[in-house]
């Protein structure tokens, strides 16, 4: 787990120490966080990023303009040769160049915010692949790879998806065990240098709350939460966009929104409902490129880059601050979105 020490400080500089500790400015309360780096940071990308005096993610969230996120991870890696059934997180260790290529492809297309390859990086999902004991390492390296790719020009969100198990009383995982699993994952992502934590594709509000609590136990980085409204305008667990907006924004998270889902119109309506329910909320949308169909042995998605770009304008018109793509979206989708939103 990362080691944080708070120090009161009034100067506005950021520095790296020879011992490998990193001072990161906490712009909200004029403090520094000193985080012990997992590797010596001399000449490292991490030190270059934090010594660049760039704005924090929280700074960006209150500034005008929209931030462009990346697109799909899983479908990209499958096309790159990820074996069927393999945990994508394994490639953080076994094929890091493929992960760097993923990130760089989206950055080259115009992404300003990228996600770590850690969606299924909690110990419950990793246990299916006998990787539970490597959870910390896999998440830390996922973060380091994304940070390396992002350099000083983009921001990195540590990606945390659902546990893959239902919480009690419907399933075997207690609320406290869920919090512990998410805390473990968030700690490793923070150690790897992410700028914020994204809790995404949630269906159960209790699980989302457990993830928020877990993240806050180990880091004070920005927390973003998106739900998946894929069942007739509700989540699989029956949560409406209005219910999600009220519950999540009340928790004091930095961003709420919708991702995945079925269609662009359905995601747009979910965002509209969240905006009406919580007018002051900062919103994020990462919709799928439609639903897949098979052509031979290949999955195809019907939403073209041009259609995605057209809808990006509609999402932004509703006040979405961060827009990207989920399943089926590609660097070409993000490139079209970047042209539409930033010219």
Image (tube, rainbow, N blue to C red):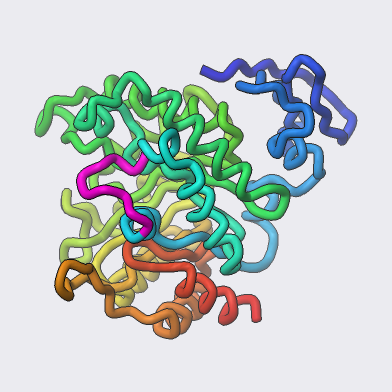
Give the overall secondary structure of the magenta segment. loop
Q: Is residue 253 visible?
A: no
Residue 217 x, y percent position in the rendering: 47, 23
Q: What's the residue at 56%, 19% (across, down)?
A: 2
Q: Quadrant of residue 306?
A: bottom left
Q: What's the residue at 29%, 53% (across, down)?
A: 243
Q: Where 269 falls versus 249 (above or below)?
A: below
View extreme (left): residue: 170
Q: Where 100 falls versus 176 (above or below)?
A: below
Residue 255: within the magenta? no
Q: What's the residue at 32%, 62% (across, down)?
A: 327
Span shown in magenta: 80-89
Q: What's the residue at 70%, 18% (across, down)?
A: 6
Q: Quadrant of the C terminus?
A: bottom right
Q: Is residue 23 visible?
A: yes
Residue situated in front as seen by the camera: 39 or 210: 39
Q: Quadrant of residue 257?
A: bottom left
Residue 283 x, y percent position in the rendering: 48, 60
Q: Is residue 20 left or right of residue 237?
A: right
Q: Is residue 19 left or right of residue 197?
A: right
């Amino acid at each position: 787990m990362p080691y944080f020490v708070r120090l009161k400080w009034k100067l506005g500089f950021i520095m790296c120490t020879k011992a490998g500790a990193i001072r990161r400015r906490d712009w909200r309360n004029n403090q520094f966080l000193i985080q012990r780096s997992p590797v010596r940071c001399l000449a490292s990308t991490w030190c270059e990023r934090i010594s660049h005096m760039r704005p924090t993610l929280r700074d960006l969230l209150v500034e005008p303009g929209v931030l462009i996120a990346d697109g799909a991870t899983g479908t990209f890696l499958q096309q790159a040769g990820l074996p069927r059934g393999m945990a994508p997180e394994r490639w953080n260790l076994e094929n890091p160049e493929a992960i760097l290529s993923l990130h760089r492809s989206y950055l080259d297309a115009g992404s300003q915010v990228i996600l770590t390859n850690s969606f299924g990086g909690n110990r419950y999902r990793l246990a299916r692949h006998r990787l539970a004991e490597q959870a910390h390492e896999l998440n830390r390296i996922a973060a380091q790879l994304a940070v390396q790719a992002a350099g000083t020009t983009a921001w990195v969100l540590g990606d945390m998806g659902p546990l893959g198990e239902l919480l009690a009383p419907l399933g075997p995982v207690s609320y406290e065990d869920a919090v512990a699993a998410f805390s473990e994952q968030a700690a490793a992502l923070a150690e790897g240098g992410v700028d914020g934590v994204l809790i995404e594709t949630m269906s159960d509000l209790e699980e989302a709350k457990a993830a928020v609590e877990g993240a806050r136990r180990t880091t004070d980085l920005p927390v973003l939460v998106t739900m998946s409204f894929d069942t007739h305008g509700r989540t699989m667990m029956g949560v409406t966009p209005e219910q999600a907006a009220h519950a999540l924004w009340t928790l004091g998270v930095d961003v709420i929104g919708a991702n995945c889902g079925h269609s662009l119109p359905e995601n747009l309506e979910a965002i509209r409902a969240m905006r009406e329910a919580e007018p002051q909320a900062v919103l994020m949308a990462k919709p799928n490129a439609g639903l897949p169909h098979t052509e031979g042995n290949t999955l195809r998605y019907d939403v073209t880059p041009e259609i995605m770009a057209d809808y990006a304008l509609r999402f932004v018109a509703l006040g979405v601050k961060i827009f990207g793509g989920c399943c089926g979206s590609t660097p070409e989708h993000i490139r079209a979105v970047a042209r539409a939103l930033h010219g």
